[in-house]
């Protein structure tokens, strides 16, 4: 009896919002007389959820492009979702009409799991504007050059760590070892740029606090869980023994998130008070002493929250892109050889490259662009929401609809990128042999919500790519008979995605040992 009762009440909780949605939708449609964008036929209640590839939804959306076009209407559990499959449509809506498409969906998991601090989830309102001001001050194009010596130092440290791992295993590096080195590199750059905090190479206590919060959040902050919690908010209050309850997980996640926001911020504030802080996001943000206490508190809170977001948004995305780059080098020896020939002709082998070499290394820049294109590590960008109903071409865009920019689909546009599934840096050169103006900006999002960390990310990626190419040759692992082993990367799923794969990493310079590498690093300048 108890079972039947709870089944009925659960069904009721699911059905009522769905009927409300259907009725609201019918009323709105009557008012507009315009069709919705085309899309697959939804089934009652679930919408189109069952026809989407759960681990690679961008693949399904790109197939929908072939069937329905650049703008596709779909539904998931009562939510209207519009997939944007072309850069032109994304710009027409999210940039040219950014006043209407800069909001974010209110995911039901955000506040209960302690993620209300995050810039990326802020509604389009004053608090978000203040966050953007703090991020802009620290990471705008003309501020980030200051971080270059630190980024270069950390890229060379990354090479040293990889060298040691490869050296101890005859060149064969396991997928998880590579992931760890690259993630440490990306995390240490963000911790330095935001908090002027120098991370330890292993088991850093502050990085641990951040990762603990992220690990838990990744499990619970999925779109499916948000949809379920949106229907059944009662799951937050039911006792732990009740199937589906998330009461204790949400409390734990809140605590971990609070620590993640507070602990590194207090560390930076202490250094500022003691007069030992170097340049970083916290020390750079002008909190005017003259401000009223209330305004000062609001600004300090925005600074604290947006700096925590910088880590969350910047570390994994940067690391994931470098992992894609290494995978591409393993799978495309021709490209790797050509890049190293360019490096040898410009730099020689007596020193390591630095930022001053960038204008002379066009092919390396093309590799960076092709890496961002070949697999945008935020394949579906971040969703934007329509603040008001709108009309685009002949279609009605309902108020509250979620717009999903399918960056992966844009990167597979055969008219712009012939043989799009191949890794070809040459596609970024014009007829005169110069780099063209496609910098794959769509991989960093659109309009007023575009990634504020893109300039910092660009410099981190370039310096990692150029340093790794200067020192190492990446190839497939060999089996006992000396044959190349097939590479089968395992891709993670979530808001971001990266490949995990073993590979063989050997120094390019014959006889290079650790001592020689350390000495090469020390004698190479920072060239800034
Ligand atoms: C390869 C590295 C990176 C990639 C591919 C990337 C990509 C993105 C994308 C696609 C978005 C969503 C934009 C939109 O809504 O249209 C975004 C947002 C954001 N990114 Fe990045 N990002 C990277 C690195 C960084 C770094 C290094 C930082 C910080 C220093 C950062 C901070 C942020 C923040 C705070 C947001 C939220 C913006 C908002 O909602 O207003 N990102 N990023």
Image (cartoon, rainbow, N blue to C red):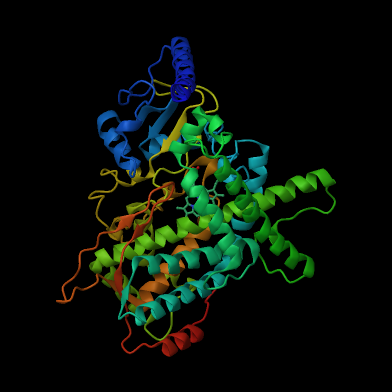
Any part of residue 366 in sight: no
Looking at the image, residue 527 sits to the left or right of residue 143; the answer is: left
**Residue in the image at 65% along x and 60% along y:** 264
Residue at screen point 42% across, 30% down: 81
Figure check: 226 above or below 162: above
As drawn, 482 above or below 516: above
In x, y percent, where is residue 281? 65, 59
> Residue at point 44% right, 61% down?
319
Quadrant of image for the N terminus: top left
Image quadrant where residue 44 sits: top left
Location of residue 334 in the rendering, given as x and y in whole percent from the top left corner: 23, 68
Which image quadrant: the C terminus?
bottom right
Does residue 423 appear in this view? yes
How far across and down, in percent of the image, does residue 147 sit? 58, 67
Instruction: Left or right? Give the position of 45 relative to 238.
Output: left
Quadrant of the rendered image containing residue 503: bottom left
Image x and y of residue 73, in percent? 37, 27
Location of residue 243 with respect to 308 vertically, above or below: above
* Image position of 94 (left or right of 291): left
């Amino acid at each position: 009896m108890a079972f039947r009762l709870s089944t009925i009440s659960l069904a009721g909780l699911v059905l009522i919002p769905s009927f409300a949605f259907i009725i609201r939708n019918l009323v709105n449609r009557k008012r507009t007389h315009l069709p919705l964008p085309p899309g697959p036929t939804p089934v009652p209640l679930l919408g189109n959820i069952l026809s989407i590839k759960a681990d690679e939804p961008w693949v399904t959306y790109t197939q929908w492009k072939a069937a329905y076009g650049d703008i596709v209407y779909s539904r998931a559990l009562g939510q209207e979702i519009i997939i944007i499959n072309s850069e032109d449509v994304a710009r027409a809506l999210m940039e040219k009409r950014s006043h209407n498409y800069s909001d974010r969906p209110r995911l039901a998991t955000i506040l209960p799991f302690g993620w209300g601090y995050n810039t990326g989830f802020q509604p389009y309102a004053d608090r978000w504007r203040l966050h953007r001001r703090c991020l802009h001050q620290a990471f705008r194009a003309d501020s980030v050059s200051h971080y270059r010596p630190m980024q270069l130092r950390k890229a060379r440290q990354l090479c040293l760590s990889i060298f040691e791992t490869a050296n101890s295993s005859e060149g064969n590096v396991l997928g998880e070892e590579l992931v760890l080195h690259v993630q440490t590199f990306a995390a240490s750059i963000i911790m330095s740029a935001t908090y002027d905090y120098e991370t330890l190479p292993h088991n850093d206590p502050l990085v641990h606090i951040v990762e603990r919060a992220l690990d838990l959040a990744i499990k619970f902050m999925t779109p499916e869980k948000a949809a379920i919690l949106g229907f059944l908010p009662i799951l937050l209050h039911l006792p732990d023994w009740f199937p589906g309850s998330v009461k204790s997980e949400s409390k734990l996640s809140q605590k971990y998130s609070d620590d993640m926001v507070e602990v590194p911020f207090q560390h930076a504030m202490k250094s500022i008070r003691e007069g030992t802080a170097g340049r970083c996001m916290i020390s750079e943000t002008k909190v005017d002493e003259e401000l009223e206490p209330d305004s000062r508190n609001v600004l300090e809170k925005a600074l604290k929250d947006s700096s925590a977001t910088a880590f969350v948004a910047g570390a994994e995305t940067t690391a994931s892109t470098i992992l894609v780059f290494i995978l591409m080098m393993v799978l495309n020896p021709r490209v790797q050889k050509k890049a190293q020939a360019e490096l040898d002709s410009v730099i020689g082998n007596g020193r390591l490259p630095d930022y001053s070499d960038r204008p002379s290394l066009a092919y390396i820049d093309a590799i960076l662009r092709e890496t961002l294109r070949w697999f945008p590590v935020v394949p579906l960008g971040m969703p934007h929401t329509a603040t008001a109903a709108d009309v685009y071409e002949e279609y009605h865009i309902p108020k509250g609809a979620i717009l999903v920019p399918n960056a992966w689909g844009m990167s597979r546009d055969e008219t712009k990128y012939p043989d799009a599934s191949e890794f070809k840096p040459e596609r970024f050169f014009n007829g005169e042999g110069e780099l063209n103006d496609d910098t794959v900006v769509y991989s960093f999002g659109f309009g007023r919500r575009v990634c504020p960390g893109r300039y910092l990310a660009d410099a981190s990626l370039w310096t990692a790519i150029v340093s790794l190419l200067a020192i190492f040759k990446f190839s497939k692992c060999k089996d006992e008979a000396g044959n190349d082993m097939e590479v089968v990367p395992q891709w993670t799923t979530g808001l971001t995605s990266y490949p995990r794969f073993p590979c063989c990493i050997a120094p390019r310079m014959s006889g290079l040992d650790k001592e020689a590498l350390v000495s090469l690093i020390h004698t190479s300048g920072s060239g800034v």
